[in-house]
Image (spheres, grey):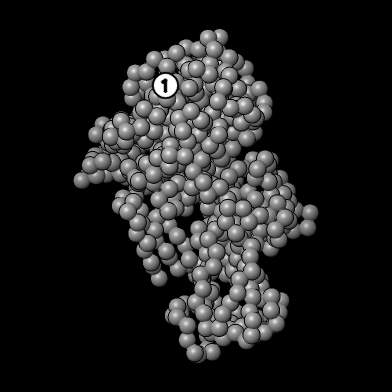
Amino acid sequence: MLEYWKDEDYIIEKKKVMPVSIRAFDKIDCVEELMKEKSVCVSFSNDYVAKFTEKGAYLVLDYGKELCGGIRIITRLTQGETKFRITFGESLSECYSSIGEKNATNDHSPRDFVADISNMSDLTLGQTGFRFVRIELLTKDVVWVKNIFAVSTLPVFEKEGYIKTSDEELNKIIDTAAYTLKLNFQNGYIWDGIKRDRLVWCGDLHQEIVNSVYLYGANKNVTNSLSFLRSETPADTWMNNIPSYSAWWVINLCDYCKMTGDTTYFENNKDYAEAIMKNFDASILDDGTIYFQLSAGQMDFFLDWPTCGKSDAVIGTAAIIMVAAKSYLQMEDNENCRAIIQKLKPYLDKPCEFKQIRAFQILAGRNVDGDALFLEKGGADGFSTFMAYYILTADAMAGGKNMLSILKEYFGAMLSRGATSFWEDFHMDWLEGSGRIDEIPKEGQKDIHGDYGAFCYEGFRHSLCHGWASGVLSFIVEYMLGLKLVDGGASYEITPHMMGVEELEAKIPVKDGWLSVKITDGKVESKIEK
């Protein structure tokens, strides 16, 4: 079953997904009927249906992978008033949780609610991120159910690229990153998360934009998102109420337009970008002191949550403003940008504690021996899904040698715990004593979903599908493949660093067709195909 919803700028595919297993059930006769393909229409027949026999009857369905959407329940017969409690979960343990338990929540998209079920009905219920669903009968009368399948919503693109290698573990990481990104392209925008954070966060958007160009080429989801943020934010305020996110907006604009050759979109928005950079210039004293006159609060100096409120956050904020200034200067000369870079240059040499801060110092222009050792110390310790792309890229710029082993250590660890999409956050120390997201924790075992997380994403509020976690794909394209894409593919460079991988093949959508690349035994073959 496929349905398509077409809007002016996007097409959404609604696809039927059958459960791959029934994880648990009680007081249900013929429950196996729900695993069988059958017509998706209400009928009078009592054949091939499951029977919820009494109050408290329940089952837990596993759809095999992270989905964005809901479930469709087709009933044959109900007797009297019928109510189901429906609880979705990105992990198996989350679908057993109640609101408030280990920070379980209905924020942004209700995932735990009671639904009225009608006699001979066909109902689609829920719109969230999930893999599992628990359905419990709350009323006393018998219910016959014909179907309970998931309805997945995914975007349809005119072009869809890929990258694959001779390393199967790396391929799984690439495919999971691409799927994570695609799930978050919803309703013509780029969300940050499909369960929670169904918003356009400007800082979080950068990796999603760059990845989207490599996978889908120029696309309206990007420009819709950037234009939406601009329309919501007057030039004399900060994007998402965070100064550094205004810097991210400039970076997003410049990177997207440079990569796709969309000069019209840049010209239509450069006045806004220039106003942002003028505000930054006015906020920085000649000695480099930063004072944001437009705001005052903890989020004034913000690169990411782990460094928020720490002295490193000031260095990180200065670095991201410098990156924005340099990005804009690649598109067009600007005196505010040149002044910003000069005033903030001392921040490049300041000592820091966190890997992501050092990474942004390098991205902003730092060039000091020993930085690769700093970034690679402890392998993937100190990584986060938001910052992994930037740390890996900075490590490569600093001459690092262990990026492949580190990214496989980090992203492979999530896969080893049952991930089918990459998470809002993950730390290597979560592995000790924890189980998989597709298993109920055993006695004495940590719940890797419900027992971890921090800041605004503690416990089950933690999203297990976040678009910012897809950036590893861009690192592989930009470093392993070594692709530098300019003007929508009108010009490009390929300087591969295979890091021990023997073969690589990629197909990247560009303005005039496809850029096809194949690397075997160090030999590079590339061409533009119409």
Q: At which x and y percent is residue 91?
A: 62, 57
Task: Categorize mark 1 by other alpha carbons within 10 Å: few (<14), some (14-19), many (20+).
Answer: many
Q: At which x and y percent is residue 42?
A: 47, 83
Give the residue displayed 40% in from the left and 28% down from the top. Answer: 273
Residue 504 in sight in this render = no
* Front-most of residues 451 and 434: 451
Residue under pointer 1: 326
Q: At which x and y percent is residue 139?
A: 69, 79
Residue 285 in sight in this render = yes
Does residue 436 lie above or below 62 as drawn?
Answer: above
Does residue 473 lie above or below 255 as drawn?
Answer: below
**Residue found at the very far top of the displayed protein:** 287
Q: At which x and y percent is residue 245?
A: 51, 32
Left or right of 39, for residue 10: left
Left or right of 423, for residue 326: left
Q: Quadrant of residue 33?
A: bottom right
Give the residue displayed 56% in from the left and 22% down from the top. Answer: 293
Q: Circle 1 sits in a helix, a strand or a loop, which is it?
A: helix
Give the residue displayed 55% in from the left and 57% down from the top. Answer: 129
* Front-most of residues 459 and 80: 80
On the rendered image, what quadrant is the N terminus found in?
bottom left
Number of numbered tags placed on the structure image:
1
Give the residue displayed 30% in from the left and 44% down from the top. Answer: 509
**Residue found at the very far right of the displayed protein:** 444
Give the residue type that dot 1 points to: Lys
Q: Quadrant of residue 78?
A: bottom right
